[in-house]
Image (cartoon, grey):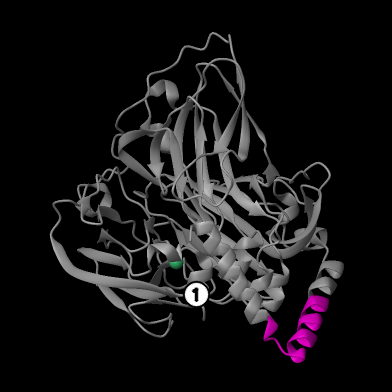
Amino acid sequence: MNKKDNKDYSKQQRMKKESYLSLGSFVSLAIFAGLLLSNIGTTSFLVQKQAFGLENQPQSTPFPGMNFAKPIDVWSKNGVLKTTLVADYQAGTIDGKPFTAMLYNGSLPGPTFHVFPGDRIELNLINNLNEPTNLHWHGFHVSPANNSDNIFLEVGPGKTQHYSVYIPKDHPLGTDWYHPHLHGVTYSQVNNGLTGLFIVEGLQKLLPKPLQNITTHTFEMKDFPWDPLFSTTHNMSNTLTGHEKLTVNGEVNPTVNIKSGETQLWRFINMNSESYITVGLSGYKFHIIAEDGYPVWKVRENGTLFLPFGKRFDVLVTGQGNGSIPLRVVNDTYNDHPFGTIVATVHVQGNQNVKPVSLPTTLPPFANSSSISKWKDLSNATIAAHRVLYWKSDDRDWVYTINNQTFDPNRVDEKVKLGTVEEWKLINLDPVQSGNFHPFHLHTNDVQVMSVNGKPYNADGRQDTVMIPTHSTVVIRIPAYDFVGKTVYHCHLLFHEDYGMMGTVEWVK
Ligand SMILES: [Cu+2]
């Protein structure tokens, strides 16, 4: 059974479960659906905007023929990003199909935030949903405690949570993102549209002078529409609408303009929670300068980019020739879209007399630090502890475990001492035919991949989202530094996470 068949198989299992639902469940389903609709009918986004001072932020413009808005860019000012996110339901259409999404500030995806190392984030999260939510800064090296990147916080319906996040002066540079991270509802909230980019600026300053002011484009890739009924029923048969489209920044097949000879910085992210994407641009190479918001030690040239859920790549691309070429889903072991699916159209303007600049093969260190933990290769690090984590799926009963345990927020699974480097062996026990890949994600500290199935891995830098293929072993090294507190590691197939595949780690002094 290949991955696709397996997905269909899982869906059949989910449908089977649905048939066990009692009449009572259907009654409560109807009540919940009614609540959802009444909320859509009565909540005015404009009123909320005025109430929370959002009317002073740059205005979003609606997509043509839709009432979802385009994401806007919000920058920090004088070292502070002061902003508000309102999570609410919003009706609109994608590809002519009506769809009710869960959105931040009415835009699909949410606003793109731009911050610098050393900045402070002061953010109000207002929850207008009928269910609890919270916020995670995916890829950020910040405190996991108090009202910082604390995924144990629960923001109830109608409640507001203030977040204060301090970004270290030597924070890695690149593309990170934000999304809800409340155990049990993460999968549906992310799939319904509650995601946005959080860019730590400064990556261009690591490039040769002529490239420091290049044009940037973001590619926030996500399958829409997703069936919002799942959020109210939590019935797995509702998770796939059957007419999902691969969208980029909320649009189907947008156009990107580049001149022949011009180099641009493209920031890719897979914002799905259960679809892999591999993209390619025929005749082009992507020069990867950051992975998971972490500048590389060595620039790798790749013809394709494989993005598990949550993965980001910052790449340099130089325009060639003249005319339009499609950015497509290309053939790869892992892919959940038909080969050839168009992601975006790249329009190259030829004969512009733009002289190409030679691209760098390495980048200078992003942080001025002598500490090995901060940014250097961990291959020769002293290892303070070795741990083994077994990842296992039961697709029939939807039980997903790490070391035979499902998630318990009150338990501490691993304690890691600050200032040390640990080596973790991640073993995926699921057989190849199960199709159950598990993208490992760790909060607070980025990791270095050391080997895959015993074969040494030549790491270009650090990552926060690492694929553990079926029936495979991946060895990683984790440097613990700067922050104490309890947080989590988990599978970023968010359905697995919601059904148990998450453990707790406490960074201790
Ligand atoms: Cu998984």
- Ligand 1 is in which quadrant of the figure? bottom left
Q: Nearer the viewer, residue 122 or 465?
A: 465
Say which quadrant the C terminus sits in: bottom left
Tell me how many marks there are. 1
Horizontal and vertical percent for residue 239? 65, 67
Which amino acid type is marked by label 1? Asp
Mark 1 secondary-structure assignment: loop
Can residue 134 be seen from the camera position used here? no
- What residue do we see at 33% from left, 34% from top? 299
Horizontal and vertical percent for residue 62? 78, 45
Q: Is residue 144 shown left or right of residue 133?
A: left
| Magenta residue check for 32 | yes
Q: Which residues are magenta?
A: 19-35
Residue matched to label 1: 395
Residue 356 vs 483, above or below: the answer is above
Horizontal and vertical percent for residue 321? 55, 15
